[in-house]
Image: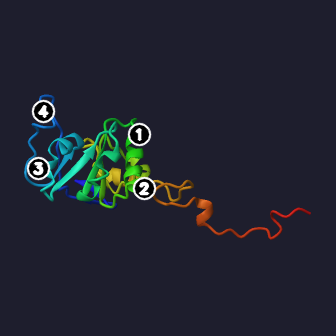
Amino acid sequence: MIIKNKTIVADDWTVLRLKEQDTAESAIVASGKVIVPLKVWQAQRETLQQRKDIGVWLASDECPEDLKGDIHKFSVVAVDFPKFSDGRGYSIAYNLRARLGYKGELRAIGDVLRDQLFYMQRVGFDAFAPRPDRKIEDAIKGLSDFSEVYQTSFDPALPLFRRTQRKGNSTAGTVQ
């Protein structure tokens, strides 16, 4: 199960993780919907680009710009969070949405916890695969931890002071 568009749904994708003995060139990509590591995509691109059921995931030390020419080929792109305290995935997600214009599903995978979900959605994630040792019903509540945000991000693009109309003193800002 994953959280997608603020709803708990069945996950019909498999995330391929390489074992120590595997290389990107030798990794076997099973049939069906598979999210492959960026290195596997790069090594097996000629074969994998023929399939419509391939997604790609980026490690926290990889650049989203490496997908620039291929980004439109994927209905799902995932970003791996190797540990809770590694925040590089937030920048990767923001860059995928804002700079590269990615419109498909953007999924957070790895060490994904409830405390992160609200902020992850702000930078463009719309799907989340919380850690399997946590209750997904609790995790989804993290998407609504706050009712308002002050700063801009991918969503919303305007700061709070630009999104509200204030009734103020008509003499405010004038010198007397």
Mark 1 or mark 3: name the one nearer the start of the chain.
3
* Residue 46 tag number: none
Residue ID at (88%, 62%) = 175
**One can see residue 96 in this view:** yes
Mark 4 or mark 2: name the one nearer the start of the chain.
4
Q: Between residues 111 and 13, which one lies in front from this camera angle?
A: 13
Residue to which mark 3 is pinned:
47
Spatial CA distance of label 1 from label 3 is 33 Å
Name the residue type under label 4.
Asp
Residue to which mark 1 is pinned:
87
Callout 4 secondary element: loop
Mark 1 or mark 2: name the one nearer the start of the chain.
1
**One can see residue 115 in this view:** no
Cβ–Cβ under 8 Å for marks 1 and 3: no
Instruction: Residue 169: give x, y in percent of width and height.
Output: 79, 68
In the image, 113: left or right of 147?
left
Name the residue type under label 2.
Ala
Callout 1 secondary element: loop
Mark 4 or mark 3: name the one nearer the start of the chain.
4
In the image, 136: left or right of 173?
left
Callout 2 secondary element: helix
Mark 3 or mark 2: name the one nearer the start of the chain.
3
Q: Between residues 75 and 168, which one lies in front from this camera angle?
A: 75
Instruction: Residue 81: give x, y in percent of width and height.
Output: 32, 40
Spatial CA distance of label 4 from label 1 is 27 Å
Residue to which mark 2 is pinned:
98
* Residue 22 tag number: 4
Spatial CA distance of label 3 from label 2 is 29 Å
In the image, 144: left or right of 64?
right
Spatial CA distance of label 4 from label 3 is 18 Å
